[in-house]
Image (cartoon, rainbow, N blue to C red):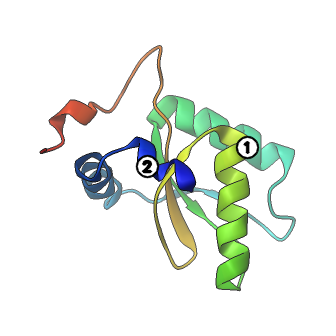
């Protein structure tokens, strides 16, 4: 989550606006962060760049820890987290989908 600093406020706001209409594509189950979940999320980020994830932990501190581990495992940036839903972003260097230059600065 500390990677948020790599994006400026305008870019984060733009990504949040794009994420508004998205549905969660990955759900962490009772086993938490498994290799299968990591692989699925990695593929989703490579294809879409911006994805929503449903976290499984019930305590706020545990969800933050789960989100940090998730971001580290797939090298993503946490755009926002509201309740059990987190939005992650990772730029695809080979074939970018989202143009951050469109963010109002």
Residue drawn where x is 73% and y is 43% of the image: 73
Q: Is residue 42 above or below residue 87?
A: above
Q: Nearer the viewer, mark 1 or mark 2?
A: 2
Distance in Å between CA atoms under marks 1 and 2: 18 Å
Q: In which quadrant is the N terminus drawn?
A: bottom right
Mark 1 sits on what residue? 73
Query: Position of 30 compared to 62: left or right?
Result: right
Residue at left offset 75%, top offset 49%: 37
Q: Among all residues in the image, which is located at the extreme left?
A: 104
Q: SS of the residue at dot 2?
A: helix
Q: Residues within 10 Å of mark 1 (few under 14, many from 20)?
A: some
Sooner in the amino-acid sequence: mark 1 or mark 2 = 2
Is residue 21 found left or right of 24 in the rendered image?
left
The one nearer the camera, 3 or 59, is 3
Numbered circle sitting on residue 5: 2
Q: Position of residue 58 (x, y in %)?
A: 71, 84
Residue farthest bottom in this picture = 59
Q: Position of residue 77 (x, y in %)?
A: 52, 47
For the point 83% across and 71% down, which residue is it?
A: 30
């Amino acid at each position: 989550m500390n990677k948020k600093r790599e994006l400026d406020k305008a870019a984060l706001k733009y990504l949040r606006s794009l994420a508004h209409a998205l549905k969660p594509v990955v759900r962490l189950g009772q086993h938490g962060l498994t290799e299968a979940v990591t692989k699925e999320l990695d593929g989703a980020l490579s294809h879409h760049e911006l994805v929503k994830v449903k976290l499984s932990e019930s305590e706020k501190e545990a969800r933050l820890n789960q989100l940090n581990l998730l971001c580290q495992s797939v090298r993503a940036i946490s755009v926002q987290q509201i309740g059990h839903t987190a939005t992650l972003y990772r730029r695809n260097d080979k074939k970018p989908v989202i143009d951050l230059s469109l963010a109002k600065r």
